[in-house]
Image (tube, rainbow, N blue to C red):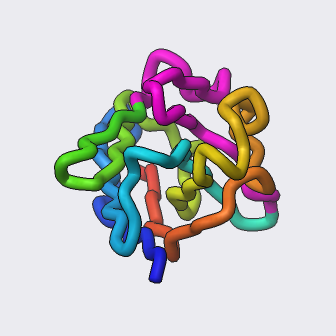
Amino acid sequence: QLQLVESGGGLVQPGGSLRLSCVASGFSLDYYHIGWFRQAPGKEREGVSCLSSGDSTNSADSVKGRFTISRDNVANTVYLQMNSLKPEDTAVYYCAAVHITRRSWPMVSSCAPNRYDVWGQGTQVTVSS
């Protein structure tokens, strides 16, 4: 059974940092493109940052220079380091993956949520003073 489990969310003040983790089980992340997505109340889910199996990345303009996606294939874990957090970053954050033979990197590099197949349950991030 393919499963992704996110953790690391919480309440943080503006300007603070959080690191989200996403542990994969039932499959190896070596053969998947992966991404972080978020959904704020009343808004559509959007791509935050995506990472190819070959470590190419693409991030939303709103988070460039503040958020960094990375992976540890030994730990089978994906991370999202979030710095200089803003209230508008408040959302439920999800990780997701798609096998490299199902869709190539050019097909998923835009970080569109509908291009990713395996999803975690999400972790809440709230940025507030």
- Of residues 55 and 59, the one drawn nearer to the viewer in this rendering: 55
As drawn, the residue found furthest toward the bottom would be 1
User: Which residue is pictured at 47% across the width and 75% down the height?
Assistant: 2
Does residue 40 appear left or right of residue 21 in this picture?
Answer: right
- Of residues 121 and 57, the one drawn nearer to the viewer in this rendering: 57
State the image quarter where residue 91 is shown. bottom right
User: Which residue is pictured at 55% across the width and 43% down the height?
Assistant: 33
Query: Is residue 63 a member of the stretch shown in magenta?
Result: yes
Does residue 76 appear left or right of residue 94 in this picture?
Answer: left
State the image quarter where residue 61 is shown. top right
The answer to whether one can see residue 120 in this image is yes
Circle count: 0
As drawn, the residue found furthest toward the top would be 65
Q: Position of residue 11 (x, y in %)?
A: 35, 60
- The boundaries of the magenta stretch are 43-68
Q: Position of residue 24 (x, y in %)?
A: 36, 64
Q: Position of residue 55 (x, y in %)?
A: 44, 25
As drawn, the residue found furthest toward the front would be 101
Please tell me whether residue 60 is drawn above or below residue 98 in the rendered image.
above
The answer to whether one can see residue 10 in this image is no
As drawn, the residue found furthest toward the left would be 74
- Of residues 61 and 12, the one drawn nearer to the viewer in this rendering: 61
User: Which residue is pictured at 51% across the width and 21% down the height?
Assistant: 56
Query: Is residue 1 a member of the stretch shown in magenta?
Result: no
User: Which residue is pictured at 59% across the width and 66% down the height?
Assistant: 118
- Of residues 1 and 34, the one drawn nearer to the viewer in this rendering: 1
Please tell me whether residue 48 is drawn above or below residue 42 in the rendered image.
above
